[in-house]
Image (cartoon, rainbow, N blue to C red):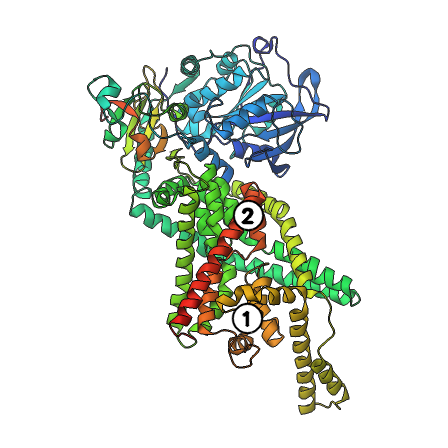
Amino acid sequence: MGKECCSASNDGSGSFAGFAESVAAGAVGAGAAVGTGACNPASPEACCGGKPGCVALTALKAGEVGVVHPTTGLNAADAALLRAMGLRPNSRIRMCRTGEPCIVEVMPAAAGACEDGCCCRIGLARPLAALVMVDQVGAP
Amino acid sequence: MTVAGDTAAVAEGSASPEPGADGSIRIAVLGNPNTGKTTLFNRLCGLRHKTSNFPGTTQEARVGRVRAHRVGEERGDVDIELIDLPGIYSLELEQTEAEICRRVLAGQLAPAGEAVTPPDAVLVVADASNLGRNLLLVGEALRRRLPTVLALNMIDLAKARGLSIDTAELSSRLGCPVVMCCARSGTGVADLSQAMTRAMVPHTTPGGTQEALESWADGVYGAVVKRDAEADRSGRAGSTLTDRLDRVFTHPVAGLAVFGAVMFGLFWTLFSFANYPMDWIEGFFGVVGGWVEAVLPPGDLRDFVAKGVVGGVGATVVFLPQICLLFFLIALLEDTGYLARGAFVMDRVLRPFGLSGHAFVPLLSSHACALPGIMACRAIPDRRERLASILVAPFMSCSARIPVYVLLAAILFPDSPLKQSAAFMGCYVLGIVAGLVSAVIVRRTLLTGASRPLAMELPTYKLPSLRTGLLTTYDRGMVFLKNAGTNILCIVIVLWWLSAYPRVDPPAEATAMREQAAAMIVTAGESQAAHEALLARADELESTNALAQSFAGRIGRAVQPVFAPLGFDWQLSIGVITSFAAREVFVSTMAVITTGHDEADEAVMEQIATARRDDGITPIFTRASSWALLVYYVLAMQCLPTLAVTAKEAGGAKWALLQLGWMLGLAYVFGLIVYQALRAAGVA
């Protein structure tokens, strides 16, 4: 895959329809409880199979880069949604802002993916971000 | 702009969509959020669209028309009907919006009033600067095996970021026409409308699993997108600025301060500018009503047209400036990309009450008027949170309550503007507290369920588009007139009738005054003034008597025992009953009952404050009853137009009835507690 910049962009619709679409599409957990995913996020080691450097997304500091781990503490519906938004396994992310909300930039996973900071930008409520596991790559 | 996909290799075995029985091609517009789908829809259709709902849901559905020109063998003009589907990240998600899209593409659902048939083609709108992720939805759309066109929108942004896309190669790999365009500037839109007439069934589709889809998308992306290395450096700079802005706008303290300033600016603008057109509208309809009264002969027809119909239409249209201006400002704000950040800031504040950050703007705008506030709740994606917000929005003290607050605060603290201000502010705080507590209660009883953690794509910061804001404003205004306007008109006519009928004979005292005035020899000066005063007094007595003897007046007398524990006499009860139409009517009703005048100027307000009950001694407005009335009006649902909009937006009359019952019950109970407590404490 060639280098790319995937940019989170406002469609300029300027309407509640557009805004609502963005949030509706991103609002997770339709009735399902947050968590109860493939592993217990309270013990990242179990989620990551003991792999060193595998932590919850909330453990990253601003500026640090990580790769989304295939196993998360998200339930199936949440995981499917975040995956569709771009947080798919092996995609590279850069932590932009920690805390509440947690803001990350997402780069699609592929060999040769770009290393710049111009990417999709997703805001996550902290309880949600805590369930996403990432393999630390380190600050750029 | 390139329209790739005209090669024979791509068209082989594919058929362009043909017009249906009504002569038009129906095309569903699909895309991720933030891809410019709605902007493109607006650019293609302009004002030639209508807004309705998808049956069985509260999801808005927009259907527009485009006239496109076909070239080639089937040359000629063809009508295209576009159905704007909700923006989704994937067709396979368990979400209402995704389900709606699936069902529309399968021919199982259509906007209200449209035939339920599969669309003739699909227009997928993708963000050219974010093609990697957008290709996932493109792949899912291709799997539907419908004639497809891909619009690569926001091409200006892609070029600014150094991206170049080989559209011919992309079209070849997808098996459908690909058009580059920029909906904001209109570039490529003409080519797109032409390409829609040549949508093609794709000759290849990605595999059925998510992994296969992602692998396919990565492969396509890698083959068609190239990036200029120089753009990396500028991209990094842009990202740094965005980081800085996000840190400020989402900061727990600074973010709140910024949000507060933005909201203050928004509502200052709203209050400052909406009043002018509202005054013009009121004046205009006053003139029209006067003209009707001058033209038609006196009688029931004249009163019905002048006061019922004209008054009713005026009472509807007068809301338009506030609604339009509010939605215009919010549209601009959203277009800048800031509103998404603001939602996260307010999410922290409102989450403990079972509401989402998106409820903040609707609740805040309800302080101007609950009607647009409730309509703005459409932006709240979670159904339970949306319903809770709709139910509690009327607790926010709207501008219609202000005349009531002013009257009662002046009665309670006649010589202390400072205390009047404090009472005023207390009313607003009480309304907010009651709203938030009610939200907690309703979310723990009727609308239970975990609050959904927010996950949202944050749009790029940019300058807002005036064109888009204006189109949105037009859309919202028309929706209001169509949905709420008819209900409001009916309500106002009914309430006018209740206040005007039955016709009664004037009281004997008024008749005597008129006879006395008729017998006077009128010359200029003192005798003319006395003559006019007699007639004016006769008018007052007749107005007061007419209202007291009307159906509304009789209802007021009949329900007075219900309000007696709150300290209301029959006159206050009439005021409460008539102000079910609109709260501000309370003051003019009290003016008519106590003085015969319907214009509540300062002198009349003074008369109202000192008017007496039937015993001729006790003031109508005692301290205890005034406090009870104030609390009552803060909490009560006294706005039938709001109920009509609640029923429409919440998806059923039961929600409006619940809202009415809960708010009236709360108002009654707390009004009673306040009155009885004050009486027990010896407060007259």
Residue B44 in the image: above or below residue B411: above
Secondary structure at numbered mark 2: helix
Left-right relation of A50 to B345:
left
Return the residue at label 2: B656
Chain label for disc 1:
B
Residue B569 image label = 1
Give residue B372's position: percent from left, percent from top: 52, 49
Secondary structure at numbered mark 1: loop
Give residue B574's position: percent from left, percent from top: 59, 66
Give the residue furthest to the left: A52
User: Which quarter of the rendered picture does the C terminus of chain B lie within?
Assistant: bottom left
Residue B643 image label = none
The residue nearer to you, when weighing B330 against B560, is B560
The residue nearer to you, when weighing B625 against B332, is B625
Q: Is residue B464 visible?
A: no
Chain label for disc 2:
B
Left-right relation of B669 to B248:
right
* Badge 1 or badge 2: first in the primary sequence: 1
Q: Quadrant of residue A25?
A: top left
Q: Quadrant of residue B595?
A: bottom right
The residue nearer to you, when weighing B512 against A7, is B512
**Neighbour tally class for label 2: few under 14, some 14-19, many 20 plus, Cα within 10 Å:** many
Q: Is residue B426 visible?
A: yes
Give the amino acid type for the residue marked by disc 1 in the picture: Asp
* Count of number-bearing discs: 2
Residue B310 in the image: above or below residue B95: below
The residue depicted at 40 percent of the width and 58 percent of the height is B430
Give the amino acid type for the residue marked by disc 2 in the picture: Ala
Compute the Cα span from label 1 to label 2: 28 Å
Q: Quadrant of residue B66?
A: top right
